[in-house]
Image (cartoon, rainbow, N blue to C red):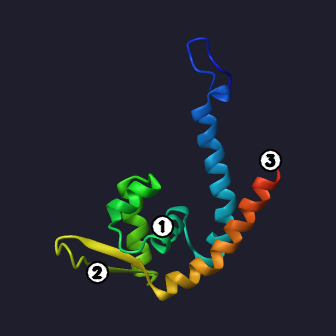
Amino acid sequence: MKPTDRDPIDLERFLPYRLSVLSNLVSGTIADAYQRRFDLTNPEWRVIAVLSRYPGLSAAEVGELTRMDAVAVSRAVARLLRAGRLRRAVSPLDRRRSVLSVSPAGAAVYREVAPVALGYEHELLGALSA
């Protein structure tokens, strides 16, 4: 596409846009490693990763930590529950609140995907100078 004179922002130089594109590119590349093998989407991986680090969060809290919208979190959680990769329980502190945790099946996926993700991060960082 060709930029227009009416466009006040040069997207190719606009840092927030460039960071968004870069984030999507990096996430998509890592996702290739686990999507085919585990039938796991990016949002599902993010939910598993966050709950592996912080078990017992509500779906809303997962959304806050990942900055994903509520619909994406809800879909990811529903799919992970159906697949047996998450567990949902009533909070012992507030019976109106449900909390999520990674099931043994979800933990097994995490143990396999995490080293791949860390290896990719290592490659990315290795290409950068101080």
Label 3 sits on a secondary structure element that is loop
Label 1 Cα neighbours within 10 Å, binned few <14 / some 14-19 / many ≥20: some
For the residues labelled 2 and 1, the Cα–Cα distance comes to 17 Å
- Toward the top, the furthest residue is 5
The residue under the point 59% across, 42% down is: 20
Say the numbered circle drawn on residue 50: 1
Q: Quadrant of residue 74?
A: bottom left
Label 2 sits on a secondary structure element that is strand
Relative to 4, say whether 129 is above or below.
below
Say the numbered circle drawn on residue 73: none
Identify residue type, mark 1.
Val
- Depth check: give the residue in front, 6 or 23: 23
The residue indicated by pointer 2 is: 89
Would you say 107 lies left or right of 73 here? right
Label 3 Cα neighbours within 10 Å, binned few <14 / some 14-19 / many ≥20: few
- Toward the bottom, the furthest residue is 104
Label 2 Cα neighbours within 10 Å, binned few <14 / some 14-19 / many ≥20: few
Identify residue type, mark 2.
Ala
- Residue 73 position in % (x across, y down): 40, 61
Q: Quick check: marks 2 and 3 in contact, CB under 8 Å?
A: no
